Structures are given as structure tokens and as C-alpha cells.
């Protein structure tokens, strides 16, 4: 089984995505309480999919923690992409840990979603390194 796009915490913004979310209904916007399309019950730290089964992952709203990064690396294909989108903060880089722990090519920039200012980080995995996670001892906290 191969899934093209997995939206962790998604509520249906990307019509082609499978939306992993602990809630079966939307929690934001004008369609609040409607069922989430293509819903798959789960969380970032416990994705109910087999390893190496996802080509691309999008994650927003909640920055990934170490347990989520490990789980994302388990399910994403060895040459897959991971896109992180979170609110811009002058006091905190929400993607620092992900950039340190996920091997491959990384690009970061600013984006806008309506009136919201976001930082977007895209990580393109390297097939030769995809199963390697930087040890926790090398991570700044």
C-alpha cells in the first residue's frame, strides 16, 4: 500500500490527502463539527500505517516532537518529502528539532495562509540516509 499524501492533523484542506487526526470532525473554520474527509484515526506519534508507505507528509498546527519525528520517518518512503508549516514565532523555531533529526535536503521560508504568517520547512529525504536519525545526544534543547 502506498499513500501519496498524508496530512498529520489534517482536516481536509488537501483533497487528495489521507488526514490523520484524533478527532473525526473538523475543529476549525466555518465547517467546524463536519466529518473530516479521508479520515484516519491517529496522532503524529502513533500513525496507524505500515512503514515506508507514504510518499509525502504535511504537518501543521503542532510542531513535531521527537516521538513524532521518529514515527514520521517510519512511515515515509526513503525518498519522500516532509513539509512542516507552523506559525512564525520570534522566540522559538518550531522546526529546529526536525531539521536536526531528519537527514536530507532542507529548505525553509516564510509563507502566508490567509492572514496567517507561517514558517514552512520542506525536507527531501535522501534514500541512503532515510533510516538514520541523529542521536538525541546531538540535539540542542
Image (cartoon, rainbow, N blue to C red):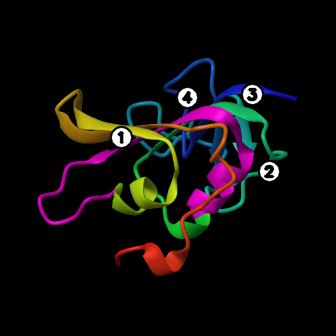
The label on residue 31 is: none
Q: Which mark is residue 12?
A: 4
**Percent coordinates x, y for residue 135 in the rendering:** 55, 73
Q: Are marks 2 and 4 in contact (CB under 8 Å)?
A: no
Q: Please state which of residues 58 and 125 is positioned toward the viewer in this rendering.
A: 125
Quadrant in the rendering for residue 76: top right
* Residue 48 - label: 2
Q: Nearer the viewer, mark 1 or mark 3?
A: 1
Q: CA distance from mark 3 to mark 2?
A: 12 Å
Of the image marks 1 and 3, the number of the one nearer the N terminus: 3
- Residue 90 colored in magenta in the image: yes
Residues 26 and 134: in front is 134
Is residue 14 in view from this perspective? yes
Task: Tell me what residue is drawn at x 50 percent, y 42 percent.
Answer: 104
SS under mark 1: strand
* Label 2: few (<14), some (14–19) or many (≥20) C-alpha neighbours in 10 Å: some
Q: Is residue 106 above or below residue 12?
A: below
Where residue 121 is drawn, which disc sits there?
A: 1
Give the mark toward the camera: 2 or 4: 2
Local packing at callout 1 (Cα closer than 10 Å; few below 14, some 14-19, many 20+) is: many
Mark 1 vs mark 2: which is more N-terminal?
Answer: 2
* Residue at the outermost front position: 128
Q: Dividing the image into 4 quarters, which one contains the N terminus?
A: top right
Q: Estimate the x, y position of residue 31 in percent, counting from the top left.
A: 47, 31
The magenta span reads 68-94
Q: Nearer the viewer, mark 3 or mark 2?
A: 3
Residue most extreme to the left: 90
Amino acid at each position: 500500500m502506498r499513500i501519496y499524501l498524508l496530512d498529520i492533523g489534517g482536516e481536509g484542506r488537501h483533497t487528495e490527502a489521507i488526514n490523520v487526526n484524533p478527532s473525526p470532525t473538523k475543529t476549525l473554520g466555518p465547517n467546524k463539527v463536519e466529518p473530516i474527509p479521508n479520515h484516519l484515526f491517529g496522532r503524529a506519534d502513533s500513525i496507524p500505517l505500515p512503514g515506508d508507505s507514504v510518499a509525502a507528509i504535511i504537518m501543521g498546527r503542532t510542531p513535531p516532537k521527537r516521538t513524532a519525528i521518529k514515527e514520521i520517518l517510519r512511515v515515509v518512503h526513503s525518498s519522500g518529502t516532509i513539509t512542516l508549516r507552523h506559525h512564525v514565532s520570534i522566540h522559538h523555531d518550531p522546526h529546529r528539532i526536525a531539521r536536526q533529526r531528519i537527514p536530507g535536503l532542507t529548505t525553509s521560508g516564510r509563507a502566508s495562509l490567509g492572514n496567517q504568517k507561517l514558517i514552512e520547512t520542506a525536507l527531501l529525504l535522501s534514500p541512503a540516509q532515510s533510516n538514520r536519525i541523529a542521536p538525541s545526544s546531538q540535539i540542542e534543547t
